[in-house]
Image: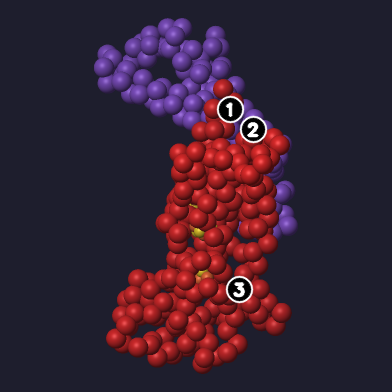
Chain colours: A purple, B red
Amino acid sequence: MVTSVTNFSRSGLSDWIAQRVSAVVLLAYSLFIFISLLTGPELSYAAWSELFSHTAVRLFSLLAIFALCVHAWIGMWTIATDYLTASHLGASATAIRFGFLIGCALLVVIYLLWGIQIFWGS
Amino acid sequence: MLVSIYRYNPETDLKPVMVDIEVDVPADRDLMVLDVLNLAKEKDTTIAYRRSCREGVCGSDGMNINGTNGLACITPLSSVVNPGKKLVLRPLPGLPVVRDLVVDMSIFYKQFEKVKPFLINEEPAPGIERLQSPEDRAKLDGLYECILCACCTTSCPSFWWNPDKFIGPAGLLQAYRFLADSRDTAASERLAGLEDPFSVFRCRGIMNCVAVCPKGLNPTRAIGHIRSMLIEQSV
Ligand code: SF4
Ligand code: SF4
Ligand code: FES
């Protein structure tokens, strides 16, 4: 058993499932946006905000933002623990990896808050 | 023909070098790579490598042959080098070199040890032996044949990046060999030791392991089975 404090859920299994579930949500959301663009009325501010005035669409968007954040964090964490390690970077690896992960975490949180504000702010 | 061999003695050399040796190989028949290496050793007796059975059973002569891991003793020359080209021999990648083609396998064995590669059964042993139906026995085919040559694990990028944390294809194949054994009663403890983010889940399905296994085994499939067992156990 290898433990780590920085990964998403402390469990490789939950991380693995979260990565796959979030991928499905993102795919569904991308398809939804793509199809609404193709089939909806000509793109205008009015048409676009009409689409996002439905509660269901806003909930779906919120879910997609959550999925994106989860997906990005697990992915970046995996990349960092594969490539930002002592065998690649030597003694300073842990510090570099921590800095990188803090940067990623900040971006993810900002993106999450920003997204919530766009969809649910007044 | 020219044989290019990785030479390195960490105690005296600053860095490894590739040394070319001209070897006379018979034109009328195919040799195994190990035979060519033996011929090269006749020219330069200081070349170090491991070998024992010379028939793909002991697993000691795993090495990187023209870029692909394999057992030198059962790899025909014609399958790795085109006529007139060089044979290039390097140690298995990702492990510390002890001397020339000899690598330090400690961390490979340590990962093997982690999966408790032995039968665990707390029930009192019956008088003669623990019986197993032919169907249950068949589930171990494709798993028990592993000779621990490390060709698979040292071809796996996930193992290169985290050799101390990712168990690697050889160890995971053996982990599944005991998970799949009807006589073993420790499945849930075994699974509990594997569900962290590294031991199993660093496998990215690259399938280098399957491509190189000289015994034709499929660690990727075994890893998939372990993953399914982990999922089943958690729902
Ligand atoms: S399938 Fe998994 S274990 Fe095999 S080489 Fe790829 S990452 Fe490694
Ligand atoms: S699975 Fe194949 S390549 Fe890997 S150690 Fe066993 S025999 Fe060697
Ligand atoms: S010498 Fe035994 S496997 Fe090659």
Residue A50 lies left or right of residue B227; in this view the side is left
State if disc 2 and disc 3 touch (CB < 8 Å): no
Q: Is mark 3 on a helix, strand or loop?
A: strand
Q: Can you say which quadrant of the picture contains the C terminus of chain B?
A: top right
Mark 3 or 1: the one toward you: 1
Mark 3 or 2: the one toward you: 2
Q: Mark 1 points at which residue?
A: B233
Q: Which of marks 1 and 2 is nearer the N terminus?
A: 2
Is the residue marked by circle 2 packed among few (<14), some (14-19), or many (20+) residues within 10 Å? few
Compared to residue B112, the image places residue A11 above or below, namely above
Q: Mark 2 lies on which chain?
A: B
Q: Name the residue under label 3.
A: B102
Label 1 within 8 A of ligand 1 by Cβ:
no
Q: Mark 2 points at which residue?
A: B188
Residues B127 and B118: in front is B127
Residues B19 and A63: in front is B19
Residue A99 lies left or right of residue B226; in this view the side is right
What is the residue that sits farthest to the front in this orientation? B127
The residue under the point 56% across, 37% down is B182
Q: Can you say which quadrant of the picture contains the N terminus of chain B?
A: bottom left
State if disc 2 and disc 1 touch (CB < 8 Å): yes
Q: In the rendered structure, find residue B150 and report the number of the disc placed on it.
A: none
Q: Where is residue B146 in the image (x, y as percent from the top left)?
A: 52, 56
* Gap between marks 1 and 2 measured at Cα: 8 Å
For the residue marked with disc 2, what is the amino acid?
A: Ser
